[in-house]
Amino acid sequence: MNDAGVRKAAFDWLANEARWRDDVLPREVLAQGFRYGGQRVPLVGPQGIFKPRLLDLPLSITTIPNGPYDDGFSEDGRLSYRYRGNDPRHGDNIGLRTAMHQRIPLIYFHRLVPGKYLAAWPVFIVDDDPSRHTFTVEVDDAHLANWSGESQGAVISDGVAQARRSYITTTVRQRIHQRAFRERVLRAYREQCAFCRLRYEELLDAAHIIPDGEPDGEPVVTNGLALCKLHHAAFDRHFLAIRPDYVIEVRRDILLEEDGPMLLHGLKGMHETRITVPRPTRDHPNREFLERRYEQFRALEISMRG
Ligand SMILES: [Zn+2]
């Protein structure tokens, strides 16, 4: 079997799917896979290490994280991947070890929320630790990676390539966190804008209440709001704010403005309305965080009045 040909076709197919699905891949699409030489090639299976019938070695590995912070990534830009079970000689573990020795590129899937995955490829198994029952994985650049199997030693010892893989792996981790935050927030808000209830997922964002990068700016649902593009930008730029009692206040100068229907209905119409919150109380926006934002809004409003 043309192993390299199947992998190349899998990467091309994934690139296309990820592009038009904005990186978030439904499980059923991956389980269905694509066709190669008349045969169906699924990309995932019931186990974390997956080998389609068409290949002798695994094609993909999948992580289902236990929580937002237990993602398997380390600070030095590597990813730990647990053996299947505790037997280092289980067929799946041998498959990954062989892929490591032959420098076979694999696909990495990370579950964002149940049923939705983010993919990274090519990934390489770069280390094997039988005492911890763990492989070490790195993501590489599809255009720069040398996976021909030739000059292996040179590739592995190359410090530049090592730094590149570490950087790309860290980038993938950030992308996973961003996308997982978005999926969790949108799901909690039942895919609708908390302000205007717009339901087009393509027009929705997961907004942070305390911005990403600030203390408390964590990617958790209670620090998030599902907002349409207009309301996300308006919220970020303090055109309006949410009081800790979940009621929207539009900035005074905007309330006094006269303009077309978007201003009238889209912004001014939000004044004194209550936001839509998720059903479970534990997912409701953090009132203390809202209060901090609201104080910034009030300070700006007062300064604008001079
Ligand atoms: Zn909206």
Image (cartoon, rainbow, N blue to C red):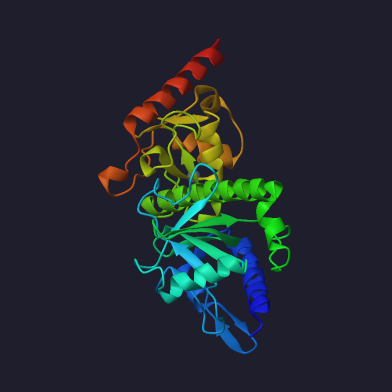
| Left or right: where 207 falls relative to 162 | left
Instruction: Residue 192: tell me if it is visible.
Output: no
Q: Quadrant of the N terminus?
A: bottom right
Q: Quadrant of the C terminus?
A: top right
Write down the quadrant of residue 3 in the picture: bottom right
Looking at the image, is 77 positioned above or below residue 84? above
Q: Residue furthest bottom?
A: 38
Q: Residue 105: horizontal and vertical position, in percent?
A: 61, 66
Q: Residue 32: horizontal and vertical position, in percent?
A: 51, 78
Residue plotted at (65% across, 56% down): 156
Looking at the image, is 5 positioned above or below residue 242? below
Q: Residue 214: horizontal and vertical position, in percent?
A: 48, 29
| Left or right: where 14 falls relative to 296 | right
Write down the quadrant of residue 242 in the picture: top left
* Total residue callouts: 0
Looking at the image, is 44 positioned above or below residue 167? below
Residue plotted at (54% across, 76% down): 57
Residue plotted at (46% across, 51% down): 180
Q: Residue 200: horizontal and vertical position, in percent?
A: 51, 56
